[in-house]
Amino acid sequence: MGTTQPNVERLEVYDYSARKSMPGRRLDSYLAAKFSNYSRSFLTQLVRRGKVTINDKQVKPHHEIKKGDRLHIELPVFAKATLTPENIPIDVIHEDEHILVINKAAGIIVHPARSHTSGTLVNALVYYCDSLPDSDDKVRPGIVHRLDRDTTGVMVVVKDEASRGWIGRQFEWRRVKKSYIAVVEGEPELDSDLIELPLGRHKYTKEKMSVNLEEGRQAVSIYTVLERFDGFSHVRVEPRTGRTHQIRVHMAAIGHPVVCDAQYGRRDVLYLSELTGEPHHEGEPPIIHRQALHAHAITFNHPGTRQPATYTAPLPPDIQCLLSALRKYRAK
């Protein structure tokens, strides 16, 4: 089936200077982190077409940003998306007449936004399901919560209006329990702790969130260390609120960002040679090249039975591979 091409409503132009050098950070990775609602492939094409320049010169996507570089970015803003059903595979964990529970893959955006009018989870859902209840903006049918593009794991989708109301109220009243698995940088001092730091939009980058003690909204997360390694930790995080990027910002705020979190972390890829101490060689594939964060379990009262139901999603291969490497080369 075909997809609807996005229509450009206007251009947003950004002009600013880099405040610091970013060793090893490619321009395309930097743009994907700064403008997370656009795909990396789309942003790469902008660079190749000269819509992103540095010091008034056209550069390549792998250009390394240096302190003082003057960036000029011409970013199109697209008209509201029109949904098109697409035959995109969905990993179904559970399905009944009321809900669909899936294991979301990495790299897929939940609903259309800006440059993404196709290839989203919603495009796959409208193909898979006969009908889904509309949302207010008409491009999020069945969606009652979401995961970031590069976060994997369990998601629930509603199939009728009654189920939307029933589960939606549980999210609103904070009665939905969620559990995430992550690999983070460093080793938290405590084996378990509560993080209560209010979150708001980043002061300079609207696509990011940050801790805002004065104007931020309440955000609460509880982490538990499952395994400790030399320089890394395997943790479970249970968010008690549902703020955008909450776990990623909270873990970064306490000095332990999620591994390979391009927006809030210390790196955007991790190679085996970095764990073994051996020299990195050209062409070495990364162990993981997206944030090591996985929505492991979700519990809520089922709209049909009105009884508690828990659904889980197994760890994806890249996080399994990362943990295996840490156990082998960074065990304590």
Image: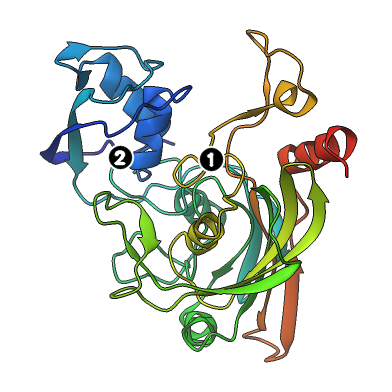
Is residue 14 or residue 101 the one in the foreground? Answer: 14
Of all residues, the one furthest to the bottom in this rendering is 306
**Dot 1: few (<14), some (14–19), or many (≥20) neighbours within 10 Å?**
some
Q: Real-space Cα distance between discs 1 and 2?
A: 15 Å
Left or right, 296 with respect to 98, comes to right
Picture coordinates of residue 83 (x, y %)? 35, 51
Which corner quadrant of the image does residue 302 belong to? Answer: bottom right
Q: Amino acid at mark 2?
A: Ser
- Secondary element at image label 1: loop
* Residue 176, position as x, y percentages in the image: 60, 80
| Above or below 115: residue 164 | below
Q: On the image, which quarter does residue 170 sit in?
A: bottom right
Relative horizontal placement of residue 52, taking residue 1 as reference (left or right): left
In the picture, the disc for residue 322 is none
Write the residue at 22% across / 11% down.
Answer: 58
Q: Considering depth in this image, is 24 or 152 the residue closer to the camera?
A: 24
Which residue in the structure is indicated by mark 1?
107
Q: Is residue 52 above or below residue 226?
A: above
Give the mark count: 2
Q: Nearer the viewer, residue 235 or 129?
A: 235
Expressed as whole percent of the image width and height from the top left, the position of residue 29 reads: 43, 29
Tag 2 or tag 1, which sits nearer the N-term? 1
Q: What residue appears at the point 27 percent right and 34 percent down from the top-left corner? A: 19
Where residue 248 sits in the image (x, y, percent)? 52, 56
Q: Which mark is residue 115?
A: 2
Disc 1 residue type?
Answer: Gly
Q: Residue at x 65, y 82 (%)?
A: 300
